[in-house]
Amino acid sequence: MPIPPTVPQRSHSITRHGDTRVDPYYWLMDRQNEEVIAHLRAENDYLARELAHLKPLEEELFEEIKSRIEETDISVPVRRKAWWYFDRTREGLNYPISCRVPAIGDDLTPPVIDPASTLPGEQVILDENLEAEGHDFLSVGILAVSPDDTWVVVGTDFEGGERHHVTVRPLAGQAPLDDQIDDVYYGFAWATDSRHFFYTRVDEAMRPWQLWRHELATPSSTDVLVYQEDDAQYSVSVGRSRDDAVIAVLVGSSTTTEVRYLPADRPTSPLQLLEARRLGVEYGVEHYTDHEGRGWWLKITNENALDFRLLARPVTGAQWRQLIAERPGSRLDGVDAFADFLAISERHDGCAAVRIAPTLPGDDPFGNDLLERSRFVDGDASPSTVSLSANPNFATPQLRVSITSLVTPRLVADVVVATGEVIVRKQQKVLGGYDAANYVTGRLWVTASDGYRIPVSVVARRDVVNVGANGELAAAKPSPFLLYGYGSYEISIDPSFSSLQLSLLDRGIVFAIAHVRGGGEMGRSWYEMGKLAQKPTSFSDFVTVGRALVNEGWTTPEQLAARGGSAGGLLMGAVMNLAPELFHCVVAEVPFVDALTTMLDASLPLTIGEWEEWGNPDASATAYRTMKSYSPYDNVRATNDDGSPRTYPHLYAVAGLNDPRVGFWEPAKWVLRLRDTNAANVAYLKSDLESGHGGPSGRYDSWREEAQVLSFVISEISPPR
């Protein structure tokens, strides 16, 4: 058999709470070490050699992916003041081109734009293809046009490290500026005067901790530090309210928040504190200006409400009044204020949903029956995902939403608030004759050992499954199956359409998302049952789902694949240790698999802020034992409980050299340990040496990488007969 790459083992001991772990590959953390880089390159070469026989399939998949996508296309134009803004993509180009065209009158109907030609007066705001010239990677983390429409601030990252270089560029024919700022993070807000703007910077651990103010045509050395958060568990973000009244600064940890603000038209005024932080109390606010010019605060909070509630008060008042009480299981996610209505985002029946609630004239714009006056924006299938799209204008009679499902290509629609009419502006085109009627989606429910029902969103070609009279799905026969999971940070993996998945579905492979605990699909309690000391519940949920799929005839262990990334990569590593016999192969992208070592190192990016999610194993022996019990790197075993050799599922792991969130060394060490433990373990490592956490930045590069992953999965669970 071909011999995979090896590196020297250099013993490194880590001792906490009387327990010593020995890590022979700890030294791989040094990205400046040429020996480390040489090993990553050797792993890439090994992968290329071992999967060379899949090149024809990979090329076939890549061409399939391209053939379904309208490569020359435009996004739905968004009206902001006197301009329509939209993005172009052109065949053969990796990146979008951001444009705008003058609007005529008050018409809210987006202009019809030929993707292959330009409109009179069309202006290019940013051509990312030009920005990317000479670089292997590009991410535009900031693209913000000034309130007077004359300047655009651009923040570029050419390495994937999420630190941006900011420039200010003219849009109205004025002389260029020399303004340049380095090491800028996400989060940005223009002041009303279009002369000042606010941005954030990170510390050495990649925590956004400082808020700065810049004035146009001045050197960055004179920028003003507006706020600094010294508590390492808290991060800083900034934004401007839709009604243009305030600049809001959110200071938050995983469990606690506070808001500071200043008037957007007085950018040099001091920050004011809205409500001081109280441990365990989360809140977010929206500013609303009524028709009489009075200011209001809207607040969503978990205070005395596990699944959050909505409150309001005048800016000059002191007492909050409840508008929407907590509804257990229906997590209140957010509120967006417009001149004549509120858009409320929430979890409804485990799905992302949006309801619209008109405001009222007079002294009380919200009334006492806000929830009763509201109505949902309907989805297209079940389960479906309804979310807000771009809505930059405060005074608008329409709300733009996005609607999708596992069989519904994403559509963008404007909802007329007064009538409820839904005007479809555009639906994602799927070339090659896609017909949604040939596919079916639904939700399975799998009961865990503690009685909780785990939702599983499924999609398959119609001839692969049996569909009951009420739309319920059942297996027709055991089929190749790809099960996806995440289950952390209260992030919901909502069902959405992907034309890339058609390459699986059309080969008879079933795709499903296991909405395990630790995610937010079923409300805040769903999240809390899969974090800290209860984190192992996420892993047992996924295994429970996998076993149910086998027991109910959906698939077999020889045909079952699993996939997850980042914290979902931790899920993959943990379930490989829990049930190695259940899955034939696993794809783990930028996986958080050396979790215990990382969470013991406070100097690494994100570690301190993550203690509220995983626990602090440095300070707590209990947290240490819990994390050690599931950390994938620490639990790779050579034998099963009966003493027989343990063989793991075939693994395809992905790392990004410049990843600031999950160190590239985590999957690199994990792959080596799997091979050391049993020479029969098949483990591959793909290291992207030019990117970070999100993988390649160009769309063709991303499609090529996806084709490689899919070729691996297909060859493993659905080989040619």
Image (cartoon, rainbow, N blue to C red):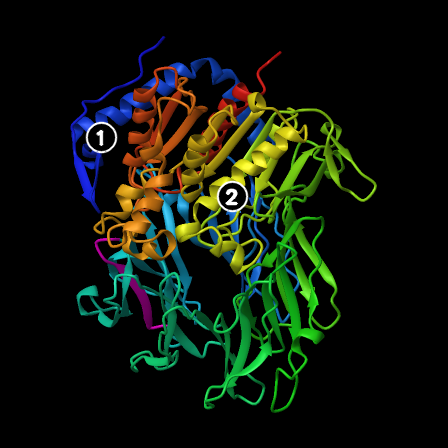
Residue marked by disc 2: 89
Say if residue 393 shows up in the picture.
no
Label 1 element class: loop
Instruction: Please state which amino acid type lies under the numbered disc 1.
Output: Tyr
Q: Secondary structure at mark 2?
A: strand
Identified at 28% across, 24% down, the residue is: 41
User: Tag on residue 25?
Assistant: 1
Q: Residue furthest front?
A: 642
**Residue 386 as seen in the image, left or right of residue 147:** right
Within 10 Å of disc 2 (Cα), the crowding (few <14, some 14-19, many 20+) is: many
Q: How many marks?
A: 2
Q: Nearer the viewer, residue 46 or 689?
A: 46
The percent position of residue 133, horizontal first and vertical second, equals 34, 40
Give the residue at x 71% y 24%. 477
Question: Where's residue 349, x and y in %?
Answer: 66, 56
Q: Indicate whether 129 appears above or below 423.
A: above
* Front-most of residues 9 and 163: 9
Q: Residues within 10 Å of mark 1 (few under 14, many from 20)?
A: many
Q: Nearer the viewer, mark 2 or mark 1?
A: 1
Residue stretch rendered in magenta on the structure: 194-205
**Residue sitting at x 58%, y 55%:** 522
Q: Quadrant of the C terminus?
A: top right
Q: Please tell me whether residue 202 belongs to the stretch shown in magenta.
A: yes
Q: Quadrant of residue 170?
A: bottom left
Above or below for 456 versus 528: above
Q: Amino acid at mark 2?
A: Thr
Instruction: From the top left corner, tell me how far across and down residue 443 is, in percent.
Output: 67, 44
